[in-house]
Image (spheres, rainbow, N blue to C red):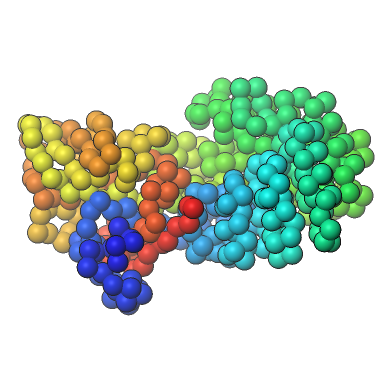
Amino acid sequence: MDSFKAMPLNATPADVESLPVRRPPLHSFPTPLVTLSESAVQNNLDTMSAWCESAGVGLAPHGKTTMNRELWERQLAAGAWGITVATPWQLSVAVGWGIPRIMLANALVQPDALRYVALVAQPTSEVLVWADSERAVEIMHTVLGELTADHARLGVLIDVGGAGGRTGVRTRDEALAVARAVAASPSLRLTGVAGYEGVLAHGGDAAALGTVRDYLRRLLDVHDAIEAAGLYPQGSPVILSAGGSAYFDVVSEVLAPRRDLAGANGRVVDVLLRSGAYITHDDGFYQSITPLGRVGGGAFRSAIHGWATVVSRPEPGLAIVDAGKRDFPYDEGLPIPQAIRRFGSETTVPFAGASVTRMSDQHSFVSVPPGATIEIGDVLRFGLSHPCTTFDKWRALAVVDDVDSDRPCVIGLAETAFG
């Protein structure tokens, strides 16, 4: 079973299929390893669903976090409107998995990808894309207009950005110009306004939250200007969308009052968060900035953890483990030693005071506090920071029943599709 580095070295396809029944102990799996804790995933699904219902917003979670079919389907079953993706490849995966509603949170200006959406994706899925320029609209209009087959009009949301941010129009006048171009195309349908606030701030202090709040008010201003100009199709529902996993509380605060699923104010308006990292949470960046830490409403639990074996003690106070940048994320903080499983033991116990100081491709350097006992052959459990760059390193993650139990058992594999 050499295609899955998460499985024991002599595993067969039958061994993989029987994991839910056999429930082998985690200590029988090799390192390096990343695990996904089922109990934490279910907690996070339930918590986010309840939070969105209470806040009065919908959810189109970003699928790029996990690129896992079962997790996407569980998000939909928990009430998600659809799945958000970032690239044409991810969109094709969503189509192949039968996702009924897909938001591409990006401009779609590749001709072949546009043809795919029109002729392959849209007959089975509702697809929405973003645009922040008249040039992007011109490309979509031209490519789709050249198709001889009948196809549904492609839904387009106006992408609103901010100074120093990523994509998105920077002014209301630019937004109106793009909206007019969309409204004028017989191949396109103006569907709403969207944007991403996470790139404009990177903390939970008052100044960062104020920056996000101001941006969202400008997004609403663009929506109101489009409505006032009569550019939305008559009687057509509209979507307002923002919200990564760091500021969905502020997004809900500003946008939720505009949600009107009954159309009582003349038009059906939905508000969709696109938070994706909540489903696994983490022990780093998202733990430090999660909105639930600011406003309450339950608590997410980290579902992703790394496991690595001590392979060298070359100096006092230093342990080298067999997992590095190829295995664990490092872009939003280094892994955090949390627990240890002694050589020959089946149980995991807390291990405090150690830290990862640096990482190479296949090894990490662990600083060990004075007096701590750690030997070659011991296995460390690490908290990880940033789910998105955890999943993309693994074609499959070992799913455990509960990572916080003394003796976790492996109950399945979560396969990924990153192309």
Q: In the displayed structure, does residue 246 sit left or right of residue 180?
A: left
State the image coordinates of residue 130 (x, y, percent, origin top left).
71, 42
| Rendered residue at 74%/60% (across/down) | 119
Q: Quadrant of the N terminus?
A: bottom left
Query: Eyeballing the image, is 414 above or below 266?
Result: below
Picture quarter containing residue 192? Answer: top right
Q: In the displayed structure, does residue 354 sit left or right of residue 116?
A: left
Q: Count how many numbered circles sit on residues in the image.
A: 0
Can residue 1 be seen in the rendering of this structure? yes
State the image coordinates of residue 124 (x, y, percent, origin top left).
71, 65
Picture quarter containing residue 253? Answer: top right
Picture quarter containing residue 386? Answer: top left
Q: In the displayed structure, does residue 108 sit left or right of residue 152?
A: left
| Rendered residue at 91%/35% (across/down) | 229
| Rendered residue at 78%/47% (across/down) | 143
Question: Of residues 273 and 395, which is closer to you in this image?
Answer: 395
Question: Of residues 332 and 350, which is closer to you in this image?
Answer: 332
State the image coordinates of residue 297 (x, y, percent, origin top left).
53, 48
State the image coordinates of residue 263 (x, y, percent, origin top left).
85, 53
Can residue 37 be seen in the rendering of this structure? no
Query: Eyeballing the image, is 93 above or below 253?
Result: below
| Rendered residue at 23%/53% (across/down) | 31
Query: Eyeballing the image, is 158 above or below 65?
Result: above
Question: Of residues 352 and 98, which is closer to you in this image?
Answer: 98
Question: Of residues 1 and 165, which is closer to you in this image?
Answer: 1
